[in-house]
Amino acid sequence: MSLRPSILDPLFAPATTLPGVGPKIAPLLDRLLGEPGRPARVMDLLFHIPTGGITREMKGSIADAPIGEPVTLAVTVVAHRPPPPGRRAPYRILVEDETGDVVLVFFNGHKARLEKLLPVGERRYVSGKIELWDTTRQMVHPDRILDERGIADLPPVEAIYGLTEGISSRMVGRYIGAALDKVPRLPEWQDAAWLERNALPDFGAALLALHKPGSAAQVSEEALAKSAQRRRLAYDELLASQLALALVRSRMRRLPGRVNAGDGHLVGKLKRALPFGLTGSQAQAIEDIRHDLVADKRMLRLLQGDVGSGKTVVGLLSMASAIEAGRQAALMAPTEILARQHFERIAPLARDVGLTIALLTGRDKGAERKAVLAGLADGSIQIIVGTHALFQEGVAFHDLGLAVVDEQHRFGVHQRLALGSKGEAVDILVMTATPIPRTLALTYFGDMDVSVLSEKPAGRKPIATKLISIERLDEVIGAMGRALENGDQVYWVCPLVGESETVDLAAAEERHEQLKSIFGDQVGLVHGKLAGKDKDAAMERFARGETKILVSTTVIEVGVDVPQATIMVIEHAERFGLAQLHQLRGRIGRGSRASTCLLVYKGPLGQTAQARLEMMRETEDGFRIAEEDLRLRGEGEVLGTRQSGLPGFKLARLEVDGELLSAARDDARLIVERDPELTSERGRALRVLLYLFERDSAIRLLRAG
């Protein structure tokens, strides 16, 4: 049940409540602005920012009108020229002013309608682009045809919107106009002095100014980024996000913690059993975590480390601390294959020092599953490794003290809290191999302390990265034959062809067939459409060295560790984002042999693609790559919010709103210190803000408190 304030109901109403949005238009708006299982709403239209604008000021005469640019002209209708009967030709209408004439062209034009719209001898105003056709000026399907009354009502500038097939910018503009009429007068949740100091309008006025600009210059990309109205709305969105995180954090902090570390004997034993020494940043992270574990407050820490920086070891040593204190520990990974791999990597170490460890995934059934559940409930299993199957109802712990969550951005705050509620005062350590720029770390993990692993473990060799044109693919295949003879293994990643997995898959299957015709059964294939167990089996065959070349779509991005894999071929590398290229490259270079990453591209490269590939060649520093990726692509892409269900931003743009984000974070902290239950006048207005931007899980937390 939602306790959303009723004042917001008009904004959360479906778009179908707007005039003109009938059964034909509704599915188009859903495709443009809805989400799976949620149709488009009034607020989705309001938060759909214009991408530019057309000015409707008169552009002088026909003779002076520029070719190919939108113009509005005052003309007199001279003659109608309908197509001859039975001919599929357009309907043409000749119009003129004192300087020249233009032919208006209508395909499938309806004679009676056009005669009514453009009566011969009458004065009309037409808007559209003039093009030359055989030295004749023509305007195909004018955007606007208006009489004297119509032109008087026309706004000076019309905003242009991002579209989907079957719907025009003008239609979207009309529905947004209707949505603006529904915006209620909302209480002001921002600090009045702050608004005045930054010359920012109120929420309703900002929306109106955004969608009804006074000049075309106001809706250029550059002007929009700096405009007071967009910044006002962006700040609202950032504050909602930061306040939600601050409330979660303060709630976690206020819940009593328990001391979750013992005397260090297990940790010491494990360190001695490791085949290599810890890096400086691993030692520091372990120190930070131990400090949190012995405090009487809940730990909520993010461990950021580039691919191969040794996060799993830090996770294991942290779990050993909790077990010394008599508690249990859980390690949760986003996929079965990763959970299995974590288990295989840490189980021998754990068992060496006398710890009991088990694996639990959604695939386990019957007696085996029962035995694991019983061991968790009676405490005989000290460490459990698994997938999100660990949060399920039937899983009960004897005394869970520490939850380690791998690849956090695949799990939302809700799941973190769900795992945290599986025990009494559970400490949470989140690990990610996605290097996250500082601005994004603040945005998505503002409720956490952060430790960073900055070095690679000893013995890791740098990876040579080369750019190769697709024309030289035969050479690449030839070089692979030689590498296989040397005992090397190869990942071959096929391109993202389109939005659809099916098309991507066709490309991978085709490459798999081609390589198989050369290398025979040494070539395996793995892709997202395979059933979980088939995918795992294909990966396991590669890990055991039964297949030497693994052709895949991007499913191998996270995790799996094959030390003999020393070559990574990424086809059509220009289609991938930087973070993704970096993640893929991190699959190799995991053993002691030198490794090579071949970025195969199809020229000519655009500027952004060129910059991305050069960056990959220059550095292996994930954080530097992440900052550059944010600059080139914006936040939604960097964290893969599109796929992971993280709330991407609709109005804020982190690449330009960095200082607004810091201000929102400080403001949120202050609010939570002064008014932790949001009961003051501003606090009540801020509750409306949290609901408006759908960060209401934070309010549920207040109620639960």
Image (cartoon, rainbow, N blue to C red):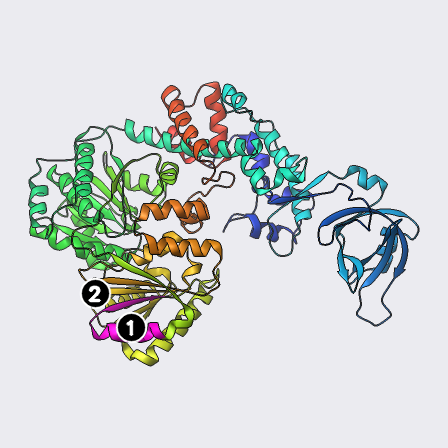
Which residue type does callout 1 highlight? Met
Instruction: Say which residue appears at 57% left-offset and 50% top-offset.
Output: 32
Location of residue 704 with respect to 472 vertically, above or below: above
Q: Where is residue 496 in the image (x, y as percent from the top left)?
A: 43, 62
Residue 689 located within the stretch drawn in magenta: no
**As drawn, which residue projects farthest toward the right?**
121
**Quadrant showing the C terminus:** top left
Q: Where is residue 27 in the image (x, y as percent from the top left)?
A: 60, 53
Q: Please name the residue shown 24% across and 32% down the image.
A: 298
Give the spatial CA distance, label 2 vs label 1. 14 Å
Percent coordinates x, y for residue 433 in the rendering: 29, 49
Above or below residue 29? Residue 537 is below
Q: Which residue is drawn at 79% across and 60% down?
A: 106
Which mark is in front, 2 or 1? 1
Residue 684 image position (x, y, % from top left): 48, 23
Q: In this view, does 387 lie above or below 697?
A: below
Q: Which amino acid type is shown beneath numbered disc 2?
A: Gln
Q: Is residue 148 visible?
A: yes
Disc marking residue 480: 1
Q: Would you name the residue on which mark 2 appears? A: 564
Position of 219 with respect to 475 (left or right) is right
Q: Hey, which quadrant is residue 44 in on the image?
A: top right
Q: Is mark 2 on a helix, strand or loop?
A: loop
From what the image shows, is residue 120 above or below residue 398? below
For the residue pair 474 and 50, the one nearer the viewer reads as 474
- As helix, strand or loop, the secondary structure at mark 1 comes to helix
Categorize mark 2 by other alpha carbons within 10 Å: few (<14), some (14-19), many (20+). Answer: many
Q: Is residue 52 left or right of residue 116?
A: left
Specify the segment rendered in magenta. Answer: 475-493
For this rendering, which residue is in front, 106 or 348?
106
